[in-house]
Amino acid sequence: MFDVQHWLTSLPPIAVYLLVGGVIGVESMGVPLPGEIVLVSSALLAATGVVEPEWVAAAAATGAIVGDSIGYAVGRRGGRPLLVRLGRRFPRHLGPAQLVRAEQSFARHGVWAVFFGRFVALLRILAGPLAGALHVPYRRFLIANAAGGLVWAFGTTYLLFSVGRAAEHWLKDISWAGLALAVLAGLASTWWLRRRAHRIETASPTPDVEPARSASEL
């Protein structure tokens, strides 16, 4: 299996920051990429002193906010047909069922779906383009997008960084245990938000929805 963290170690710090921002940015535009894996790996790498946690978090937040905004603009111009075409290209991640569930989340929860969507793979990919396609007011979208991106990026990075440093101090001779502890802490750090986001994603039943009807009210 490809070892992301080991590969990141071979890169200069500036390349790691650019990679974090780039992968998360493209993912936020609507292209399925492993943005969270890259962030977690880079945050753990920061605990070893190879990169700086503040720059990892800043790169992730910038990628999330800018990527979502670009996705919003593309979705607003291309509308739902664009999302349908993306679904044909990435049926496993953005197929009709996933699109319907995402639309239901927006219809039911409005911009809160953007904030909590940052913590769920499906909505993290679709939030920007779908908000644009549904004509969510950009100011409200940007506030929720920025808040979600900052909380997700800085919260994930600094929690993993802090736990990784503690593990490195107390478990110097058991590196695998330190890594396992850091990963578990990272999973625990987003548990509540993932539960909340999952409830948002699945709160509505799956019958057909009419997203255009409530788009201007979001």
Image (spheres, grey):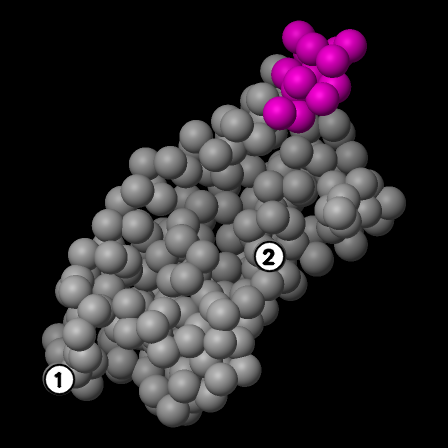
Residue 81 visible in the current orientation: yes
Work out whether 202 lies above or below 93.
Answer: above
The quarter of the picture where the C terminus appears is bottom left
Q: Which residue is mark 1?
A: 213
Q: Point out residue 212 in the picture as x, y percentages from the top left corner.
A: 19, 85
Q: Main secondary structure of the magenta part?
A: helix
Q: Residues within 10 Å of mark 2 (few under 14, many from 20)?
A: few
Q: Point out residue 81 in the picture as x, y percentages from the top left corner.
A: 38, 91
Q: Point out residue 131 in the picture as x, y percentages from the top left corner.
A: 32, 74
Q: Is residue 50 left or right of residue 217?
A: right
Q: What is the span of residues highlighted in magenta in the rendered image?
A: 167-180
Q: Is residue 168 magenta?
A: yes
Q: CA distance from mark 1 to mark 2?
A: 33 Å
Work out whether 158 lies above or below 142.
Answer: above
Amino acid, disc 1:
Arg
Q: Secondary structure at mark 1?
A: helix
Q: Is residue 62 magenta?
A: no
